Image (cartoon, rainbow, N blue to C red):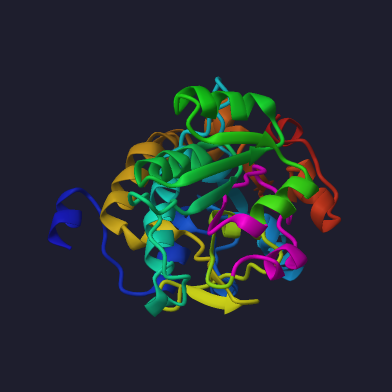
Amino acid sequence: DHDFEEAGAQIVYGSEETYHRSDLVCRVGRPSTEELDLLKPGGTIIAFQHLAVIPKENMDRFLELETTLIGYEVITDETGDFPVLNPFSEMAGQMAIPLATHYLQTTKGGRGILIGNVPGVPPATVLIIGAGTVGVAAARSALGHGAHVLAVDDEMAQLRSLSRELIGRPHTTMATTERLSRYSEIADVVVGAVLVPGRRAPHLITEEMVKKMKPGSVIIDVAVDQGGCVATTRPTTLDRPTFVQHGVVHYCVPNMTANVPRTASRVLTNAALPYVKALAKKGLKDALREDPALAGAVYTFEGTMVDAGLGEHFGIPTTPLTDLLQ
């Protein structure tokens, strides 16, 4: 506490005081249902929001409190990159393969196979769904372990980029229902790496596909924060990270990087601090007027829905942010 106070912080000892004394609340994830009653009317919350998966009544409560919600996960720079999200996607992709290796062991409910190659024995097959930042990191890690890697995506540019970066070593193909069904059936590991920024992830692996997977195979659904790209996905916790359904081990921990908190905290500070400082120094409206990247990450502004896609999802009328900032 002394180190924080020396840097100018004030230490408080309850969540309610934190919310009610703060105009800007910086979090990792969005407030939980239980925390909604703590929110200060008219406040601003910046976090990894993933609002497409929250109950409608929670969204109504945010609007009722005239809350401004800004999502780290949809901050987009002038190159189209995601400067806050991408480092976490990279971390999650790196973590996925060691987790799969762990849960393939028989004591964890897995098939009892090594993910890599041993002379005379073929390696495990890893199916990666999505060739973005998570998919590339997972493919690189799987190849490093000696696995046989299949990567699918619905965008040829993404597959081409992955293939070039990893020198063509993963086998790439366009995503179709037929291919996903065939490849998931032979896979020992499926990594869900699908991202639709700010939207719920589509269920590309159906429950019927899961039923046909090998007993003891493993699913690591990194897309669980946005609802998951596997039909059988449901959020788990770090205390109980897996469940078995249809004989398949599912690892579905939202914010899985919380298990490496020292690295994750430094990554979040490096990536998010410039935006937080802008909001603190310039105030909400001026910061949004001056930075299109920050403005593009606003879901609700002072109780008004401004994100058209999210508004359509919840059936809530939207108003362009530019109109509200005039």
**Residue nearer the viewer, 254 or 149:** 149
Q: What is the quadrant of the N terminus in the image?
A: bottom left
Q: Is residue 85 visible?
A: no
**Residue nearer the viewer, 235 or 141:** 141
Q: What is the quadrant of the C terminus in the image?
A: top right
| Rendered location of residue 242, percent (x, y) | 49, 74
Instruction: Point out the stretch of residues depicted in magenta.
Output: 185-214
| Rendered location of residue 156, percent (x, y) | 68, 26
Residue 71 is inside the magenta segment: no
Give the left or right position of residue 247, taking residue 140 as reference: right
- From this viewpoint, which residue is outermost toward the front? 120
The residue that appears at 58% across and 37% down in the rendered structure is: 131
**Residue nearer the viewer, 151 or 230:** 151
Relative to 73, residue 204 above or below = below
| Rendered location of residue 291, percent (x, y) | 54, 26
**Residue nearer the viewer, 209 or 51:** 209
Instruction: Count the marks.
Output: 0
Give the left or right position of residue 112, taking residue 58 as reference: left
| Rendered location of residue 284, percent (x, y) | 54, 39
Relative to 174, residue 34 above or below = below
Most common SS among magenta residues? loop
The residue that appears at 65% across and 76% down in the rendered structure is: 246
Q: Is residue 29 visible?
A: yes
The residue that appears at 71% across and 62% down in the rendered structure is: 59
The residue that appears at 37% across and 51% down in the rendered structure is: 120
